[in-house]
Image (cartoon, rainbow, N blue to C red):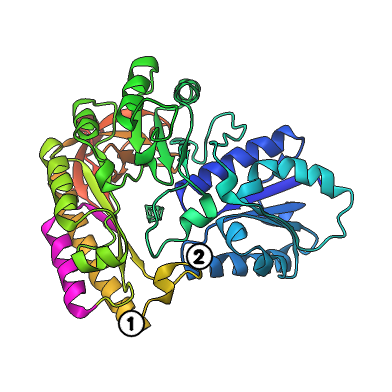
Amino acid sequence: MGTFFIQNFGCRATQADGAALETALERSGLETVRERGQADLVILNTCTVTASADEDVRQTVRRVRRENPAARILVTGCYAQRAPEELAAMPGVTWVVGNSHKVRIPEILQEESATTPYHGQIFVGDIFAQQEFLAAPVEDAAGDRTRPNLKIQDGCSNRCSFCIIPSVRGRSRSAQPDEVVERVLRLSLRYREVVLSGINLGRWGREAGIQMRLADLVRRLLEETAIERLRLSSIEPMDLSDDLLGLMASSPRVAGHVHAPLQTGSDSVLRRMRRKYRPRHYEERIRKARALMPDAAIGADVMVGFPGETDEEFEENRSFIDSLPFTYLHVFTYSGRPGTPAAEMLGQVPIPVRKHRNRILRELAAHKNLEFRRRMVGKRLSVVTLEQEGIALSDNYLKVEVAVPREPNRLIELAIGEVTPGGLREKVPFHILL
Ligand code: SF4
């Protein structure tokens, strides 16, 4: 077994784990290949946040088996932790390794590869036994060649009634501050932008032993590294402290981008979801963010079709969202996860109704996004040029088509000329027009 290919599913934390695993496997002597069909070993680093995430993984196992029957398949990540037997029973799957054993994959492969007539061997343990932040031996985080994603927090100690994540990722735990500084220092030598991510990033530093909050860490990174742009991924609304928002607003090196999961603007549904804030708290944080950062991206995850969601509750949610200055939304349709309290609740919403509500919110999101993009025409935005030719990503999370070819991984300012179907276009510079 000499070559491998890793396919990541799901969130940024999973992508960061995948990048770490890639580095660890390369160090153990395996070679990564770009085509799944050419690999001796295919690793599926999975997500289990919805039923359709599970289905994607199962479909991929079947596809890998068809296109590359000689490859061994190792399934890891959140789905592997949640339902190892289900995956181990699938034809073609050689190993199932839960999040509890993820960092041991190189070791497992070395021990097992000599004796691999096995089918569906399972390595899964108690994820709650894991108290420490397991920093896999990653050289430079990566995941994206121009905007590496650095996971600094894992797990979640909340118990939202719909969410399977705590049972597959374990309790909240954080990377040590010195280690984060050291990694960002190294990344800053190669990249302009680093994205700090986690399962519940706003909880960074809350466990015993770290006397800092996320804002303190960001401040330290700004002082002790030369990174030109830091972007914070999703932060629960109640962790968007005045200190953190103030820091984001006052430092041009922190991207003007707030992503705060809302889930719903209906108070009664929020309570059934066991979310810890009320709509008025959420609204207050978002309005504060907008007041401090008039041009920032403001995004949210929202969910439709939670058990018992009535037409009135959905309307309460829709109008709440409509009233707030969001620039984009990630709209999810509720799907019951076995083992979560919500999956047992009465009043499961019919699928066509869930789909209809999803469409309404997507349309609302598209409208808000378009309005935001129109507002950017005529302004100058700070962008990082991406690997994808001719495209850059702005500080406020908009894709911009550049008018003049530029190398990837540059931080530049662009004048915005017009709106495109999915983003913006740079104003053609005067000297090009001549
Ligand atoms: S905050 Fe709630 S929704 Fe988010 S990971 Fe934790 S339990 Fe899941």
Which residue shows up at 19% across the image and 47% down it?
A: 418
Within 10 Å of the Cα at label 1, are there few (<14), some (14-19), or many (20+) other Cα atoms?
few
Q: Which three-letter amino acid code belongs to the residue tagged 2?
A: Ala
Q: Which residue is mark 1?
A: 347
Instruction: Using residue 315 as the reference point, say whether residue 221 is left or right of it.
Output: right
Which residue shows up at 21% across the image and 35% down it?
A: 245
In the figure, residue 83 lies in which quadrant? bottom right
Magenta stretch, residue numbers: 310-329
Instruction: Using residue 112 as the reference point, say whether residue 397 is left or right of it.
Output: left
Q: Magenta segment: does it hold 294?
A: no
As helix, strand or loop, the secondary structure at mark 1 comes to loop
Question: Closer to the observer: label 1 or label 2?
Answer: 1
**Dot 1 beta carbon under 8 Å from ligand 1:** no
Q: Which residue is mark 2?
A: 53
Q: Main secondary structure of the magenta part?
A: helix
Quadrant for ligand 1 reads bottom left
Instruction: Using residue 77 as the reference point, say whether residue 30 is left or right of it.
Output: right
Depth check, front residue: 153 or 56: 153
Q: Which three-letter amino acid code belongs to the residue tagged 1?
A: Gly
